[in-house]
Image (cartoon, rainbow, N blue to C red):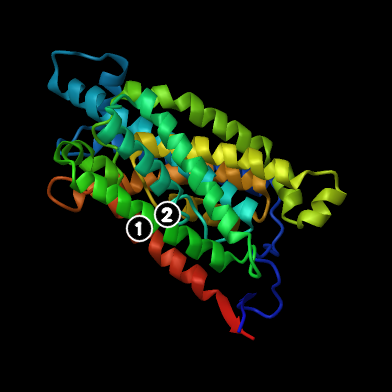
Amino acid sequence: MAITLAPAHPSGSSTIPPTPTRHPLAYRVVGAGILLILLAFTLVFSLMVGARAVSAGEVWQFLLKPDSADPISQVVWQSRVPRTVLILVAGAAFGVAGGLMQAVTRNPLTDPGILGVNAGASLAVVVGIAYFGITEINRYMWLAFSGAVVTSLAVFLIGNTGPMRGNPIRMTLSGVAIGAVLGGFTSAVLLTNADVLKKMRGWSAGTTANQALENTLSIAPFIMFGLMLALALTKSLDVLALGDAAAVGMGANPNRVRLIALLAIALLAGGATAAAGPISFLGLLAPHLSRMIVGPHQGWIMIYSILLAPTIMGCADVLGRIIVQGEMPVGVVTPFIGAPLLIVLARRLRVAEL
């Protein structure tokens, strides 16, 4: 008995179905402008909302003229600004990493969280902190990069071997299984090290709190380089979507494209995980919403993901601050948004038994 994946609609034949509607350039530019405005509003709300509400006027005043003697200024600069910058940097990284994964694997069900890449980066960081005493982010971020690379390679190798190579469901299940195993190891390390658990409890759930601005800025150059790599690959990814044979015929090198994409994914997912912890579903939501708006054009999907992912992350973070007394980590809120989308995507595909 073999299991093959088929589109829910008989006329479809691609794993990521092309959008039939043509999207003119003006439409895409206007959409990007609207998203930029939404992102700006989200970041402003992130600066205003919290245990102590701060008005927009006060935020603007203390951003321009910090006052070390004013408690509101301290709230703005020591709490709100660092987490808002982290939302912008980590959100863009997770969103583009998910878009790259979906493009390289031609699998609409992937993102760094679902495929276990975040779990691999998390385990590497936790092991480094628990057993090697590495506590500075500019040191353990290299562990996060390494964990992301190794996990990505493992998932790609498992998903592209055997009689069902390249099957989206096979690759997704492989990633979920690897992520579950790595998550179990991470939990075991944390639960057997009380000091590390106390220190990493919030981070392991995925949070924007308690990360200094300097730490986010130290990892931002690596994420910027990953974003530049992703944007540089967009034309090659459009060609790769036609299949390896067609890509080679058009002068592309599929293996080289995948290798560079893997490096970009490691920089983006590893860096974002090191700074904010493992946050799931951002890399699933942003590229899919982008594809719905602009169609199957990787360049615009990446641009829209850069804007959409931090907007979603910012909304989830602000929501987590107000729905419960205290605060709910953003990594706990995003699954409530992303899981329904994953269910919808799974229902659009049918499994045929032959």
Q: Which residue is mark 1?
A: 335
Q: Are marks 1 and 2 in contact (CB under 8 Å)?
A: yes
Q: Which residue is mark 2?
A: 281
Residue 256 position (above or below residue 176) = above
The amino acid type found where label 1 is placed reads: Pro
Taking the image as shown, residue 137 lies to the left or right of residue 13, namely: left
Q: Position of residue 351 (x, y in %)?
A: 57, 79
Residue nearest the observer in this picture, 245 or 65: 245
Q: Give the quadrant of the C terminus.
A: bottom right
Please tell me how crowded label 1 is: few (under 14), some (14-19), or many (20+) other residues with Cα within 10 Å.
some
Q: Is residue 91 left or right of residue 46?
A: right
Q: Label 1, label 2: how many angstroms apart (C-alpha)?
A: 6 Å
Q: Residue at x 52, y 57 (%)?
A: 110
Q: Name the amino acid type tagged 2.
A: Phe
Kindly identify the residue that appears in the image at 46 percent across and 45 percent down.
Answer: 309
Q: Residue furthest front?
A: 131
Question: Which percent across, then down, holds residue 276?
Answer: 34, 38
Q: How many marks?
A: 2
